Image (spheres, helix red, strand yellow):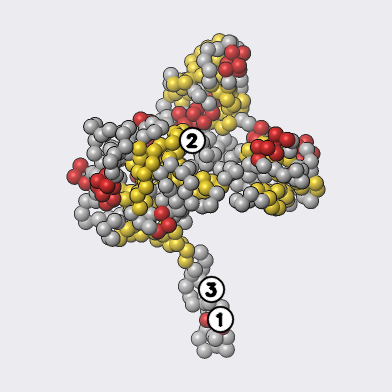
Amino acid sequence: MNRTAVLALILAALPVAGLTATAQGSLSKPAAGVDMKSAPSSFRDLAKRLMPAVVNISTEQALAAPLPTFPEGSPAERFNDYFGRDGGAEMQGSLGSGFVISADGYIVTNNHVIEQADTITITFSSGRELQAKLVGRDKDTDIAVLKVNSKTPLPFVELADSDKAEVGDWVIAIGNPLGFGGSVSAGIISATGRDLNAGRADNFIQTDAAINQGNSGGPLFNLAGQVVGVNTAIISQSGGSIGLGFSAPSNTVKRVSQQLIKEGRVRRPWLGVSVQDADAALIKAYRAKGLTGVIITRISDGSPAETAKLEVGDLILTIDGKSVGGVREMTRTLSEKAIGKPVKLSVVRDGRARDVSVTLTELKEDDEDAAAAVPDTAANSNDLGAELSPVDDDMRRRYGIPKDISGVVVSSVSPRGRAYNKLRRADVIVEVNFQTVSTVTQTLEKVKAAMANPSQPVLIRVKRKGETGGWFDQFISIEVTK
């Protein structure tokens, strides 16, 4: 998720099947008759209509158990105040946004807004406050569903078909940036299908509508008043909006929220393969037709892929007739398939096309692969789980590495590797366990040697570029055992 600019998580539909929502509370109007392409003269009426379904979310979390107090009347009693031992745990709060999706009180927000919260308070635009309980949350998509109890039906909004959203469409964001509840910003969809390396099947909608800390979990509306995305992240050098905001698409939100409401968790299908992207040249070498696909590089024992007799080297071109554009698209496509039902893969093996039927099973936490399809890259193939490159002139230009810094630059980090959330893209490794390194081979050899002692973490010293452009030393420890 790390880039030259800092990618910062910003804290704080049809009605969902199975809910008791009624049409009376819906604030979303049918898309028919709404010009989605032309700029309206004002967003006033749209914002006024939608505001009652958008909520501010505040949370509190106890950071630690209260410290013990000295007994009353004891000689040390006077130290209770000195040490701050007032019997209460230190509390930490956060702010975020959300929106109501049903008349009976289901609310969608981001997982990182409410994660580890002990209490969750919902504040409506009218000033009304209700306590919410957590229905379920999904770390991978960063989606959470809350529930409030209300004696009267609540106004709610509907989820759009995000597959119909196009670059250039007008959108508005409503939320609680920096605690300023009910804030409205407008912009357009800048891009779709963005991959931020934040999850297994990233598919973010990019917008230039201003999104800041506290907007997280809030809705991104189209001009029909339907939610096209959930505002989740920004890229920023300062921490504020620079016009690079990212929203989880509503079709993903719809699928995840329905499962959370029904089961309290998300069940994911599992194929059990590692794959690499196949370009036009590779596809031609397979004597196949098409421009995109993926090649199986590894099959997990006991996986559906093994059961279906898929083989390493198989070129997958389509899934249920839909072309596979690459690893990320394959992962997204498989994530939407039903567990326990057959999926037809069009593969090429030994220059001959064939169809293979695979019945996907549920992904378990202890499955070897962390996703339905795992990219097989250079970052996956070494002990660090990081793709390394020598610091040459090209890398210096690409990452702005000064001439007085030498070592090995990190090009990417695998989400399956030991260095995930430790090393960052553009980090320059200069030492491993206090020994200077200057080549990729030397670095990997020293890491491997250090890992011979599983009781001692590997200490890596890197040069890292700061937000102001300067470079500083950073020390990172990486555990040998997972």
Point out which mark residue 222 bears: none
The residue at 60%/43% (across/down) is 4
Looking at the rendered structure, the secondary structure element under dot 1 is helix
Give how far across and how far down residue 99 sits, in percent. 33, 48
Give how far across and how far down residue 414 sits, in percent. 61, 38
Q: Does the residue at mark 2 contact the one at mark 3 (Cβ under 8 Å)?
A: no
Mark 3: few/some/many CA within 10 Å (<14, 14-19, 20+): some
Q: Which of marks 1 and 2 is nearer the N terminus?
A: 1
The residue at which mark 3 appears reads as 67
Front-most of residues 341 and 414: 414
Residue 423 shown left or right of residue 119 in the figure: right
> Total of numbered circles in the picture?
3
The amino acid type of the residue labelled 1 equals Tyr
Instruction: Give the distance between the C-alpha atoms of the residues marked 1 and 3, in whole angstroms.
Output: 12 Å
Q: In the rendered image, which quarter is residue 247 located in? A: top left
The residue at which mark 2 appears reads as 194
Looking at the rendered structure, the secondary structure element under dot 2 is strand
Outermost front residue: 41
For residue 449, say whether it is visible: no
Front-most of residues 252 and 124: 124
